[in-house]
Image (cartoon, rainbow, N blue to C red):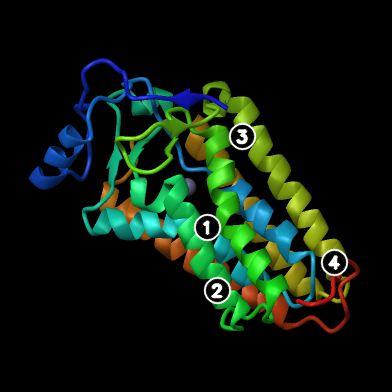
Amino acid sequence: MLLCCRTRPARVVPAGYDGATQGQARFLEAVGPRDPRGREVVMFVGHLGVGLALASRSARFRLGTLLGAAMLLDVLLGVFVLAGMEQVIVPPDFATAHYLEFVFPYSHGLLNSVVWAGITAALAGAGWLLIGRGAAAAWIAGVAVFSHFVCDVVEHVRGLPLLGEGFPHVGLGLWKAMPWALALELLLLAVGAALYLRSRPGLSRLRRGVLLGVLGLLAVLQLAGQLGGGMPPPAPVLAVSWIVQTAVLVLLGLWVDSGRVSSPAAAVSGG
Ligand SMILES: [Zn+2]
C-alpha cells in the first residue's frame, strides 16, 4: 500500500478548478501542498459489484440497502461538496487524463469511513435498514460501507486521508494503469452480479432483465466516461448526480428484491 505523506512541492491550483468559492479556495490553500500529478476518478461499478456480492449472502440482505451502503461515502461526498466542506478539482488536462481530484476528508477519510460504517451497522442492527436485524445485519451493512474505502484505496492515485487532509494518505494508485483499473471494476461487477443472481433463483425474468440492463448500461457509461473525452459538469452537478444515481439504484435494488418467491441458494442464518 502506497503511503503518501505531505512532503510535496508547492500546491498547484489547476486552472480548470471547478466549483470553488473563495472560502473553498482558502481551505484548499490551508490544507497544504498536494502532488499536482495526484488525480482521482470516482470508482463506481466496482462498488456496485461489492454490494451485489454482499446481498447474495442472505435473502434478508436486500440489494437496494446494500447498494446504498456500498455507495454511501460518495453520497456523503456529494452532500459535503454541496455544503462547501469538500471539494472537486478539475485539472487542466482532464480531457486527456480523465481524472478528477478531491479534497474529501469527511466522507472518505479512514477514521470517518469507520464512523460511517459504524453508524450504518448500528442502524442495520436495530432493524431499520430492511436487511433484518441483529449482528448479521449490522456486520453486512458495516462491511458494505467500509468496502467503499477499501476499493477506493486500491484505485486512487493520490490516496485517501487517514484522518484529515493534514495527515498521510493511502492509495495504491491503480488508476495509473487505467485499463487494469477498469478491468478490475468490471470484474467486481460481473462477479457480484453472478453471485447475486445465483442466490435469487426465484427472480422474475423482468426483474433480472432490468437489473442486468441497468448494470450493463452503467458499465458502458463508465467505460465511455473514462476512456472518452470532454469536460465534466460543474462540481455541484456532479455532487447532485452522485446522490441521485445512488437513490435510483437503491430504489431499483429494493424493487428487484421485492418480487422474490424462493429462498436464496447461498442463504446464511441470523440475518
Ligand atoms: Zn468514493
Q: CA distance from mark 1 to mark 4?
A: 22 Å
Residue at the (42%, 65%) spot, across then down: 244
Viewer-nearest of discs 2 and 3: 2
Q: CA distance from mark 2 to mark 3?
A: 33 Å
Q: Depth check: 222 or 43 in front?
A: 43
Residue sitting at x 69%, y 73% = 135
Q: Specify whether tag 1 is near ligand 1 (CB below 8 Å).
A: no
Q: Which of pointers 2 and 3 lies earlier in the amino acid sequence?
A: 2
Choose between 234 and 269: the one closer to the eye: 269
Cβ atoms under marks 1 and 4 closer than 8 Å: no
Looking at the rendered structure, the kind of residue marked 2 is Ala
Reading the image, the residue beneath label 4 is 199
Sequence-wise first label, 1 or 3: 1
Would you name the residue on which mark 1 appears?
71
Which residue corresponds to mark 3? 182
**Amino acid type, residue under disc 3 in the picture:** Leu
